[in-house]
Image: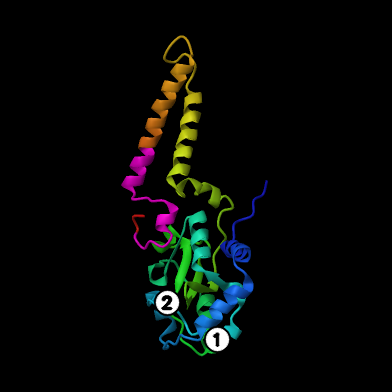
Amino acid sequence: MFLKPTNIQDQLEKLRINEVEGEKILESVRKILEENRFESKNLVEKVKRGHTSTANDFNFDLLETGNIYHIDQIKKICIDFRLRFLDSRYFKGRIPQEAYDKIDQLEKQHETSISGYKIIAPSKLFRLEDKDDPLLFAPIGNDYFYLIHKWGTDLHPLRKLLVLPFRNIVNLAFLVMLISCLCTFLVPEGLFSKSDSGSERMIIFFFMFKCVASVVIFYGFALGKNFNPAIWNNKYIKA
């Protein structure tokens, strides 16, 4: 069966439509944009350096409302798909010229200098180049962000399922139990005794559980791994 790759922009759009009333979010953004002003700097340097900013002076009437997202929606998508939402200065991948062209166009349309760029991408893209689905945002203010550009390929269609165990300790423990059960059933009958009793299987299961759990714990501590809610906006590698 053919599985369609996951488009993070589509996932954000679905979440925004389901969770936020259109008029309410637009009114909030309209009020925010009446209060903010910023100065202009070199475009590429601004994106690469990722100067800290919490808002930009956009002209509300010129914004594409479908590109406006709240931080809670971005956080949920990042947790579900194990992505990070960080300042652009931490991004080590290549930002395409199309993104800079859109920024330049936005600045001319809105007669402002955009700053505070942030990017949604898998963790590895904040350390080395790859090609998975980054999204470039600029802050509007009051925890709202404007999607400027998306590039690269879409995420693997099973990524949300594959990273599900890393969402919390309960999911991870459930996965460890499933693997332990599978390993227990793979042990041949009568390997440790002539009779294959339920108590023997239970002992084997606990042994397998301890082995699998030990490997998971060692892997987590050795590589500094953490659960999705703890890393979605964490700038450190060991997370």
Considering the numbered disc 1 on the image, is that residue within a helix, a strand or a loop?
A: loop
Q: Nearer the viewer, residue 99 or 230?
A: 230
Considering the numbered disc 2 on the image, is that residue within a helix, a strand or a loop?
A: loop
Residue 54, label in figure: 2
Q: Nearer the viewer, residue 197 or 236?
A: 197
Residue 145 visible in the snapshot? yes
* Residue at numbered disc 1: 59
Q: The residue under label 2 is which amino acid type?
A: Thr
Q: The residue under label 1 is which amino acid type?
A: Asn
- Quadrant of the frame with the C terminus: bottom left
Q: What residue is shown at x 43% (from left), y 11% (from top)?
A: 193
| Residue stretch in magenta | 215-236
- Outermost residue toward the right in this view: 1
Q: Earlier in the sequence, mark 1 or mark 2?
A: 2
Residue 192, located in which quarter of the rendered image? Answer: top left
Residue 211, label in figure: none
Q: What residue is shown at x 57% (from left), y 50% (from top)?
A: 158
Q: Nearer the viewer, residue 87 or 227?
A: 227
Up/down of 114 relative to 21, above or below: below
Q: Is residue 58 left or right of residue 207?
A: right
Query: Circle 1: is it few (<14), some (14-19), or many (20+) Cα within 10 Å?
Result: some
Query: Circle 2: is it few (<14), some (14-19), or many (20+) Cα within 10 Å?
Result: some
117 inside magenta stretch? no
Residue 118, x across and y down, in percent = 45, 71
Q: What residue is shown at x 49% (from left), y 16% (from top)?
A: 189
Residue 40, x across and y down, in percent = 42, 88
In whole angstroms, how far apart are the C-alphas of marks 1 and 2?
A: 16 Å
Residue 5, x across and y down, in percent = 61, 56
Residue 101 visible in the snapshot? no
224 inside magenta stretch? yes
- Outermost residue toward the top in this view: 194
